[in-house]
Image (spheres, rainbow, N blue to C red):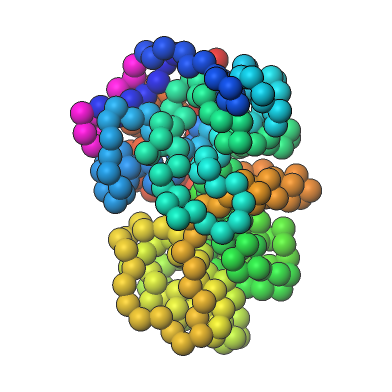
Amino acid sequence: MRAIELQDGPGLANLKLVERADPRPGPGEVLVKLHAATLNYRDLLTIEGTYGVRLRTPLIPLSDGCGVVVETGEGVGRVEIGDRVCPLFFQDWLSGSRLEQPRLTALGGPLDGVAAEYICLGEHGVSKVPSFLSDAQAAALPCAGLTAWSALFVEARAKPGDVVLLQGTGGVSIFGLQLAKAAGCTVIITSSSDEKLEHATALGADHTINYVRTPEWGSAARKLTDGRGIDHVLEVGGKETLAESFRALRSGRHVSLIGLLSGRAEGSIGLGTNVRSIYVGNRFDFEEMCRGMETNRIEPVVDQSFKLGEIPDALRFMKEGRHFGKIAIAIGD
């Protein structure tokens, strides 16, 4: 099979298109022929060696993909040949509270990921996906989709009428927009691009803020609620945005710490503020999310698609912040 390997240490220059032996499933395992993958900012940090975990090479990167089960090992019963599935971000987190060491079971580092034509996994580590989604749309679910779902509905328990503040127009934030609107929430979203804000409005955003023209966007967001404040913030920026998130927040409501685009956040937390670090989610919540998306016919937003051998170019495109929603990788035929 063809695969992308990270070789000889971190850096985009060390990504190589290689040939590997096709894997074969053992007892309890399934072989998935991958059709599509999508990028997460975590993938870039892992490849560049700045994610904060020990990097081993060679490594097949990327965590999020979608494909079809083409072979099963002895004893497999959860899925069948021909089922379309996503590999789960955390292979061993099936339900309940978070694992003690979840990173040890994550695809795309430390485990080999989905930048390959085939992947062999335990049957417990895959789940079926809604039939109305394309392969690229389904491949957006395991990390970005589940992170937004976990933040809004598992941790914050968002409900109709709540006000949600989203930062930027990357994968998690656009999922957050779609999911929050389906749940009856009011959505405020920020970006430095008026064009992207227009796209967000077309998707249902109630209010938009250009944070370049309005650097004190936290206060601006609060004003949009007649001073009451925001119920839920999906905080993807890190240290350069957290103060504004707290400024916008209603007392006693939720900030979900998700991303580190500007570095790790430091500083004081307001009295009564509920702050939760969101680290994707488990298989039970993934399947709940898929049912919710199917009921509401929510289609993930995919911006552009690159080929398997173009992954370095796709990662550069993401690093430049030129995308709206998700960036896809077409794998195989």
Residue occupying the far right of the picture: 295
Q: Specify whether 230 is left or right of 292.
A: left
296 vs 27: above or below: below
Q: Quadrant of residue 131?
A: top right
Q: Is residue 100 visible?
A: yes
Q: Position of residue 45 (x, y in %)?
A: 32, 46
Q: Specify whether 107 is left or right of 48.
A: right
Tell me the quadrant of the picture where the N terminus can be found.
top left
Verify whether residue 302 appears in magenta: no
Q: Position of residue 291 (x, y in %)?
A: 74, 47
Q: Quadrant of residue 191?
A: bottom left
Instruction: Please name the residue shown 56% across and 59% down the image.
Output: 97
Q: Is residue 224 visible?
A: no
Q: Quadrant of residue 323?
A: top left
Tell me the quadrant of the picture where the C terminus can be found.
top right
Verify whether residue 15 appears in magenta: yes
Instruction: Please name the residue shown 31% across and 72% down the image.
Output: 266
Q: Position of residue 220 (x, y in %)?
A: 49, 78
Instruction: Please name the residue shown 71% across and 23% down the image.
Output: 80
Residue range corresponding to the magenta coloring? 8-18
Q: Nearer the viewer, residue 298 or 125?
A: 125
Residue occupying the far left of the picture: 8
304 vs 116: above or below: below
Total number of numbered discs in the rendering? 0
Q: Position of residue 151 (x, y in %)?
A: 56, 62
Q: Nearer the viewer, residue 133 or 108?
A: 108
Instruction: Please name the residue shown 28% across and 39% down the image.
Output: 55
Q: Specify whether 37 is left or right of 320.
A: right
